[in-house]
Amino acid sequence: MPGVSLKNIWKKYGGVEAVKGVNFDCQKGQFFCLLGPSGAGKTSILKMTAGVEEVTSGEIYIEDRLVNDVKPQERDIAMLFENYALYPHLTVFANMASPLNSPIRKAKYSSNEIGKIIRETARLLSIEELLDRYPRQLSGGQKQRAALGRALVRKPSVFLLDEPISHLDAKLRHNMRTELKKIHEEVGVSLIYATPDQLEAISMADVIAVINKGEIQQIGTPEEVFDHPANEFVAGFIGEPPMNLFSSSLRKKTGELFLRIGDFELMLSQEVKKKLEEKMVFDEIKAGIRPTNLHVTKNKKDKNSIAAEIYVFEPLGRYSIATARVNNILLKIKIRGHFEATEGEQVWLNFDTNKFHFFETKSGSAIVT
Amino acid sequence: MAEVVLKEVCKNYGKVEAVKNVNLKCEDGQFMCLLGPSGCGKSSTLRMIAGLEQITEGEIYIGDGLVNDIPPKDRNIAMVFETYALYPHLSVYGNIAFPLKIRNFSKSQIDKKVKEVAEMLDMNDFLSKRVRSLGDGQKQRVSIARALVREPEVFLMDEPISHLDAKLRTRMRGELKRLQKETGITCVYVTHDQIEAMALGDKIAVMNFGILQQVGTPQEVYDHPVTESVAGFIGEPPMNFLDCAVAREKGDLLLLSPSFKIYLPNKIKKTIEQKGVPSEVRMGVRPTDIEVSREKSEPESIRAEVYTIEPRGDGLVLTVKLGKNLIRVECAEEFKSRTGDTIWLNPEKERIHLFDKSTGESLI
């Protein structure tokens, strides 16, 4: 059973179409990520699911119940925003207790039960020691956990999170990613998580819906969207550094298939050749290759090596990122292990020729991935 | 072009000591990154170099000259901030030309210089646009162009790209580095982002609590951090730290904890023995320096339980439970495991770091 199901959802603000015919199912207990740049429509989708914004057209189901006309407080949903919205004058305990004390639930819980629920939730979030503190006495990460706790105590059937950790610093974000994933595994609630950060999506989600300009671009597991992007947008949005994409053309010569890169022609692998032939060869195409699928050497390796100039070299500890220039094309390369190069140096590029992705120049749709 | 030298520089705000006795030399043409968490004193240091803050104590030299008493406008420096501080009513051209105009350059001189800089930053196409119509990346490019057009001896940059989105940040980072290399202008660059510092800096100066902790090349600070705080600050995911006892067994030295036992390799053993063997240490090991396997592969393999698995696209980050501790390990995408599985860890012993438990200083 889907935990949340959106069917052909549209949202218009005046003449602006923010969400255009979105369909997806977040299965019960799934960690479902809406990934896209700002303005993609992620927040609008969450707000419509929560019921704080009207749907222009389409249907929203929560555990098979049509909720278009159900009030937010009756949808059994908890939503958490980037700013925590904790009550500053209440302790963490009181903040977490507030939803249980709200008028629509008051009859349900005794103060003993409330205490028990809060202590259990606090233990899950490792904030047991903070229950007596006020929000101003907490760090950013602790505040976020308290806010999470307040949402969790209600045991909602759906959890909506809107960029909950994007404002935290890098280290803390890292820890919170691990914790959120763990908490989700333990609580098992259906979770829709909106973020512009591809790493958050890739590392936490069961399923990712990549969205741009109000339209879903692709829905798939992290592996699927990374390894087989459905179009140029997904290819360029997922991965860090992003996939190298450049306009090119294909040419057949003595039974082999060659890809133009600047003034060079790169012989493609038999595997790719076969795939391209099945789909008919397009003259003009967009070629894509991930920074981990090309390699820099100081000497020419074979006749498929391409001469390039180091444009920028960035050492990053156990790996480095080189930007190399071939004519006017800049290509990023992720180099594992120790390697040194300086700007302006002449090097050779060696491609994993069976790792190329190809997209239609006009539509951007994947031909071969 | 000029070098920048700080000698025993201090900055106090009332009773708060924001910068404590910093000695730093940024050579002519060098890209120096001041790296540290917020409040570590890096921006105060930069602002003293710029002349925007009084120096409480110490001396700052730009080129050969002591600049303590020289006003900012006479220091021949150019600053780029996180906020662009552009003139919204002027065109891109007008903004870049502005510093030359107020210095009474002729129209033709201005035109020549603006176009040169625009060419270098690949912004010829939007010189006539109003700045308010530009995206964030382009705005920052305009403010960099405006700084560049003056041909300053030193560039001072304070988190110029930290507010840009991830994609744009990576791109601008590359462009900045390229630009600095092409112009050869000395650059002091403040950031809290260790990846940015690693990628950009010829040298990185790591600061914390107003104190300069370490100055070195990116590889030096990554491979040989002098304190636990530097070790933990550089690298992503961050270094793992585990407390353990040091014990002797026959001729060997080993690290002991309830969940593991590691015989120290000779080189580390010798270094420690020279300094005096402590009874307890904090061990540091980077997520990349631990090999994982499904089976116990060596007598010393460490048993751990998978806590979470985070795919990265081109690899995995595992968080594993080691007794009561959680540590992170990077491994290949092909490594199959599930939460709760038992796996075995083999740290690369040559790459282990050891720190004094009370002072945080590196012991090796």
Image (tube, helix red, strand yellow):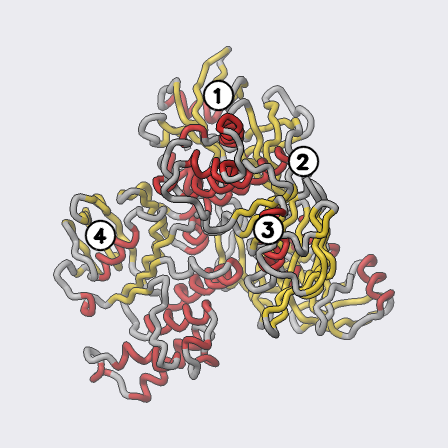
Sequence-wise first label, 4 or 1: 4
Find the distance from the CA under tag 4 to the CA under tag 3.
Answer: 59 Å
Of the numbered discs in the image, which one, if any, rests on residue A259?
A: 1
**Label 2, label 3: how many angstroms apart (C-alpha)?**
37 Å
Discs 3/1, front:
3
Q: Are marks 2 and 3 in contact (CB under 8 Å)?
A: no
Q: Looking at the picture, which amino acid does disc 4 mark? A: Leu
Tag 2 and tag 4, C-beta contact below 8 Å:
no
The local crowd at label 2, few if under 14, some if 14 to 19, many if 20 or more residues have their Cα within 10 Å, is some
Query: Circle 4 is placed at which residue position?
Result: A6
- Residue B208 lies, in percent from the top left, at 63, 64
Instruction: Report, in whole angstroms, how far the alpha carbon at label 3 lies from the one at label 1.
Output: 54 Å
Residue placed under numbered mark 2 in the picture: A341
Give the number of the mark in front: 2 or 4: 2
Tag 1: residue type? Leu
Q: Chain of mark 1?
A: A
Instruction: Kindly check if marks 4 and 1 are in contact, taking CB atoms under 8 A apart as contact.
Output: no
Instruction: Output the chain of dot 4.
Output: A
Question: Pointer 3 indicates a residue of which chain?
Answer: B
> Of circles 4 and 3, which is in front?
3
Instruction: Kindly check if marks 4 and 3 are in contact, taking CB atoms under 8 A apart as contact.
Output: no
List x then y, in percent, for residue B44: 59, 60
How far is disc 2 from disc 1 in space, using C-alphas? 27 Å
| Residue type highlighted by circle 3 | Pro
